[in-house]
Amino acid sequence: MEHIDEVAAANERKWEREVQKGGGHTIPFLDLDVEELRRFVRGDAREDRLVGRLEPRRYVSIGPLSLFTDLEGKDVLCLSAGGGQQSAVFGLLGARVTVVDIAQGQLEADREAAAHHGYDVTTVHADMRDLSSLRPESMDLVYGMTPCWAPDIRAVYAQVARVLRVGGVYRTDVGKPGLHFVEWDGSGYRITKPYCESRGPYDDDGGVETRHYMDDIFNGLLDAGLSLVQVIDGARWRQLPDAPPGSYHRMGAWTGGGFEIIARRAAS
Ligand SMILES: C[S@@+](CC[C@H](N)C(=O)[O-])C[C@H]1O[C@@H](n2cnc3c(N)ncnc32)[C@H](O)[C@@H]1O
């Protein structure tokens, strides 16, 4: 695959290394039980066993649960969401699943999950800013993970709008821009950089993340022909203030992490 820019190349390398390390976002969901899953997404199965098994995985995002109903025969694109987690949930719930990711190792996990659970999956090695290998108006739902890996969020939205059917739904999560890049200093979180757009490559993993401006995050949807349906603040479910200092969950609890956006493709 020819990279659109150096950011894409750096982030592919970062995520392939993450796969090699077995990072938390790269482990496929192989132990899901479809009946438990159905009860969980209906919200009527909060028994400890299930909550214990699924809730800690909230860092691997499966929400809002309303998107996980009535999926039989629906076309769902998991966008920059490789790793065999969201695709496993959608596949088990009867959706026709396609996964786009820039890291082959992540897509391998989606194929592993599909083979393990016995559903079909289509994996596409591509940049979320170029979905030209997918047919226009072919998806009912685009379930996207944070576009922070792409410098231009509007380019992602344009691709999403192209592949969605009229009335189709787009879901993404976005880090709270002002708090996206905070550093743990041993006792609290410090903002150490001005509010600029990009950061990286990181010394430790070479990845490059972009903090998008709020107006691009929201106006960009409208400009792409997507209407806003719902915004869900991540602080509502990141309630783990006692998580270990410096940990991912602690940062989420203290900064609120991000938010989810649900949008719908309007008629053209
Ligand atoms: C935080 S992980 C999300 C995946 C995982 N399913 C989860 O829930 O944590 C971010 C994913 O974005 C992918 N990615 C990074 N840059 C990308 C790009 N430009 N286009 C497509 N995927 C990209 C990475 O390879 C990685 O799989």
Image (cartoon, rainbow, N blue to C red):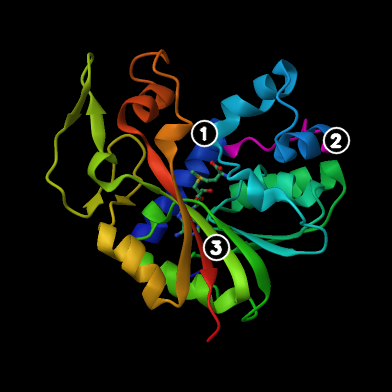
Instruction: Indicate left or right for 197 with 156 as reference.
Output: left
Q: Which of 215 and 1 is in front in this view?
A: 215
Q: In the rendered image, which quarter is residue 221 located in?
A: bottom left
Region in magenta: 26-34
Image coordinates for residue 156, horizontal then vertical, percent: 44, 67
Instruction: Tell me if label 3 and label 2 are in contact, CB under 8 Å.
Output: no
Dot 3 or dot 1, earlier in sequence: 1
Instruction: Tell me if label 3 and label 1 are in contact, CB under 8 Å.
Output: no
Q: Is mark 3 on a helix, strand or loop?
A: strand
Q: Main secondary structure of the magenta part?
A: loop
Q: Is residue 31 magenta?
A: yes
| Mark 1 lies on residue | 59
Instruction: Indicate left or right for 194 with 232 as reference.
Output: left
In the image, residue 168 above or below residue 93: below
Say what amino acid the circle numbered 3 marks. Tyr
Kindly tell me whether mark 3's CB lies below 8 Å from ligand 1.
Answer: no
Q: Does the magenta stretch include residue 262?
A: no
In the image, residue 224 above or below residue 153: below
